[in-house]
Image (tube, rainbow, N blue to C red):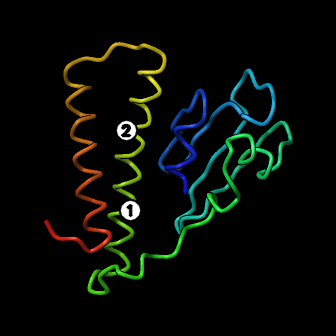
Amino acid sequence: MLHDMLPLLNNLKLIKSDHWLATCPAHNDTNPSLAITELPDGRVLLNCWSGCTAKEVVNALRLTLRVLYPQPDNPSQSQAMSVWERHRLRKKLRFEELVIAIYEAQVKKSIPFSNSDLLRVCTAFLNVNELQKKLVGVTA
């Protein structure tokens, strides 16, 4: 899934909602040439403007092409939750995971954080935990 792939990319920039640009891991890229788009149905599109295939990109990240497609719901998931509610929660979960991924990338590069940034990351970790519980039907 997209949240597995984004933390592995370098020079990741959010262009607009569900659209990112990064340096391509499949070739010696100096200027970001990999476009990443998440479609409303959860599929992920990859386009390397230098010509690398999606398979080459995901292989360079040590992932499989399965990461580009939404995975089936957990069978134990509560059927009472509407499809739209699950979609909304998943989208919020992906955003919180992106906040964490950006934090982890900055930690790797030894970039300092303000107290408000650290507080936001802590909140993201808590939100991820709660959202995951809701999505698998666990009540706290």
**Element carrying mark 1:** helix
How far, Cα to Cα, is label 2 from label 1? 14 Å
Which quarter shows the C terminus?
Answer: bottom left
Measured along the vertical axis of the image, is residue 11 above or below residue 89?
A: above
Write down the residue under mark 2.
99
Which quarter shows the N terminus?
Answer: bottom right
Q: Residues within 10 Å of mark 2 (few under 14, many from 20)?
A: some
Instruction: Provide residue 73's location: percent of width, then percent of height.
Output: 45, 76
At 42% from the left and 29% from the top, the residue drawn is 104
Counting residues from the N terminus, which is met first, the one under dot 2 or under dot 1? 1
19 on left or right of 32? left
Write down the residue under mark 1.
90
Residue sitting nearer the eye, 15 or 85: 85
At 72% from the left and 23% from the top, the residue drawn is 31
Q: Residues within 10 Å of mark 1 (few under 14, many from 20)?
A: some
Measured along the vertical axis of the image, is residue 132 above or below residue 10?
A: below
